[in-house]
Image: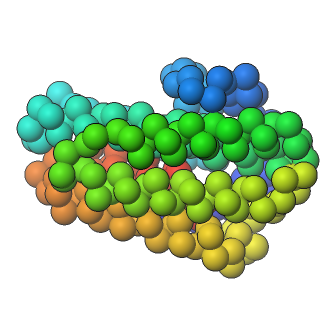
Amino acid sequence: MRALHSLLLLLPLALAPDVASAMDVAQVPTAAEVANAYAAIPHQRTQFDASSSTAAAAQKANLARLFAYTDRGVVLRVQGMKAHVAKDAAGLKRAMAGYEGLIADLRNERLSAEVAPAQALIVEALQLQQRHLRSRPEGGLVFAREQISTVSDVKEASGKLIKAYNILMRAFPGEPPRNKASFYDHLCALDFL
């Protein structure tokens, strides 16, 4: 999806406010925590606008819930990356517990037939990302694109997120440009690549 340059990535992570470090595992991140996480990557965040959506009411609600989960994933992604850069084993353990909660919550969510295939792929991508972050429990993983793009779990997770995006685009072709951008931004920000 979107290329991240190592210097641009590591500097914001080092300088970013404490992105949800005290966030309870099951707690939904605040709007400020989500904004800080997107800024730390850095990545634009286009919020899904249910009021302008052409989807049926139930599908609008499903999309909004799905993207609340992906925002939670972006916060956890940044937590995990920050913990690795700082070699903060306790912070990494908190992020991994957050991933466990997110994966369980998203897996158990009952979404419409149009959204469910993307949901399943996002769960699988989160599991792969978690496995990658867990691969060095003491921290110290590198997130420069040159290195991370060769990691099989990261590449596979990226492919699943791209497939999830394509599913949503095919399922909701009549969405306005803002919502199509939202589909992209939410899934791209979740992607390590």
Residue visible at 84% across and 53% down in the picture: 137
Decide if residue 148 is on the left or right side of residue 69: right
Give the image location of residue 30, x and y in percent: 54, 21
Residue visible at 19% across and 36% down in the picture: 60
Residue visible at 88% across and 41% down in the picture: 88
Q: Nearer the viewer, residue 103 or 176?
A: 103
Residue 108 in which image quadrant: top left
Give the image location of residue 168, x and y in percent: 26, 56
Q: Nearer the viewer, residue 173 or 133?
A: 133
Decide if residue 122 is on the left or right side of residue 178: right
Residue 46 in which image quadrant: top left
Confirm whether residue 46 shows in the render.
no
Give the image location of residue 178, x and y in percent: 27, 43
Residue visible at 49% across and 42% down in the picture: 104
Confirm whether residue 146 shows in the render.
yes
In which quadrant is the C terminus drawn? Answer: bottom right
Give the image location of residue 110, x and y in percent: 28, 40
Decide if residue 4 is on the left or right side of residue 121: right
Instruction: Report how many numbered discs are placed on residues in the image.
Output: 0
Q: How did the renderer colour the structure?
A: rainbow
